[in-house]
Amino acid sequence: MKNIIESWEVRETDSDFFVPEYIEQLADRVQEFYDFEVYGRTVVTTKPDKGGAIWKLETDKGPKSLKLLHRRPTRSLFSLGAQEYLVMEKKANVPPIIRTRNGNMSVCAGRKLWFVAEWIEPLSPVSKDLEGAKQLCAALGEFHRLSKGYVPPAGAERVSRLHKWPKFYEKMIYKMDWFRNIALAYDEMPASKTLLSVVDKFEKQAKESLDALLHSEYVNLVTKGNQHFGLVHQDYGWSNGQKGAHGMWIIDLDGVSFDLPIRDLRKLITGTMADLFTWDPEWVKEMILAYHNENPITPELFDILIIDLSLPNEFYKNIKEIVYEPEMFLNAETSALIHTIDDLEQSKWAVLEEIKKDWSELIK
């Protein structure tokens, strides 16, 4: 059996839930650290490119989840401590961690951390409409508010993105030049001309957003420190916020980090607008207000939310993979996608202006 868990290749003949046998054997060993008997174990999701997986366990003490965390153990310890803090100290609706017989939060096997948590059921997604979006935003606001004051356990990395916003903006600007050069180098590909027709505009947009950030209250805000703002989820959306028996639950916390909380809200808004294929002012206002009612947004944070929304986020998110396989990426489908994103971005500006104008009315 291997002593180090690595990413694994999934062949065409493998199931989507394929996990290498040596990892299943490690899972057998991990289960022995717990005070329950396992009747069955079913893979529910995998991250083969990173070396992670989640199983549902049927035990004599009810259903549990077993999770193999793909990050460094010290990084994983940060997220486990956060999950424990939210449950034990703040009574938040996140899955409680089951301690081992020795009282530990996790087990180290294959140089990765594994942990067991309660399997929350029933859970169901919110409706894909404005009411569902508002429920997601309200749950996110509550999560951010309850996470304030978290202190990582001894031995954990101190994971923070609080001071990294300018670098993220700069990276986006830098990559725009990559996109341009790749399109020029592969000028015969179907999407190259389309990409070249928009990249200058989006690069300018990103530069203006960076300038706005540097002239905002960002620098002063981040001096308040990690505990002041609490944790962001980083991967929050329609699958990680779900309805349960006691309200909304937030799951999959293994990527949490200290940061300005409105980064999660920005991602949720931009992703939702992309699903609608246009920016809708009513949706954006109601989503911000639902969040604000649970975790009040100061005028300074609102300004930074608007700046972050002004970035060409959807363009960057969808095009950045071009650097790995340009010949496969620059196809007709990508050309159509760029046109769709361009239309989406053009619909954004009037909405942002309307939201800024209505801010004082929005928070009454």
Image: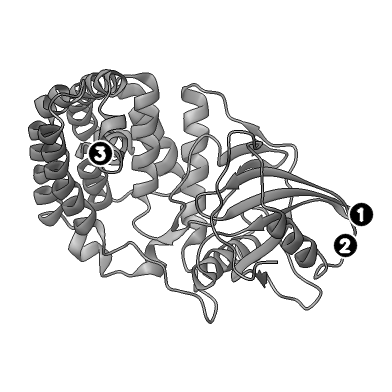
Question: Looking at the image, which is closer to me, 339 or 309?
Answer: 339
Residue mark closest to the camera, 1 vs 3: 3
Which residue is rendered at x = 15% and y = 24% of the image? 188
Which residue is rendered at x = 27% and y = 51% of the image? 301
Say few, some or many: other residues with alpha carbon within 10 Å of mark 1 (under 14 / 14 to 19 / 20 or more). Answer: few
From this viewpoint, is residue 96 visible? Answer: no
Residue that label 3 marks: 316
Are discs 3 and 2 less than 8 Å apart at CB? no
**Mark closer to the chain start, 2 or 1:** 2
From this viewpoint, is residue 100 visible? Answer: yes
Amino acid carrying label 1: it is: Asp
Residue that label 1 marks: 60
Say few, some or many: other residues with alpha carbon within 10 Å of mark 2 (under 14 / 14 to 19 / 20 or more). Answer: some
Label 2 to label 1: alpha-carbon separation: 6 Å
Are discs 2 and 1 less than 8 Å apart at CB? yes
Amino acid carrying label 2: it is: Phe
Label 3 to label 2: alpha-carbon separation: 46 Å
Q: Quadrant of residue 106?
A: bottom right
Residue that label 2 marks: 36
Label 1 to label 3: alpha-carbon separation: 48 Å
**Mark closer to the chain start, 1 or 3:** 1
SS at circle 3: helix
Amino acid carrying label 3: it is: Tyr
Position above or below: 234 against 345: below
Position above or below: 285 against 215: above
Q: Quadrant of residue 122?
A: top right
SS at circle 2: loop
Position above or below: 155 against 319: below
Which residue is rendered at x = 46% and y = 63% of the image? 148
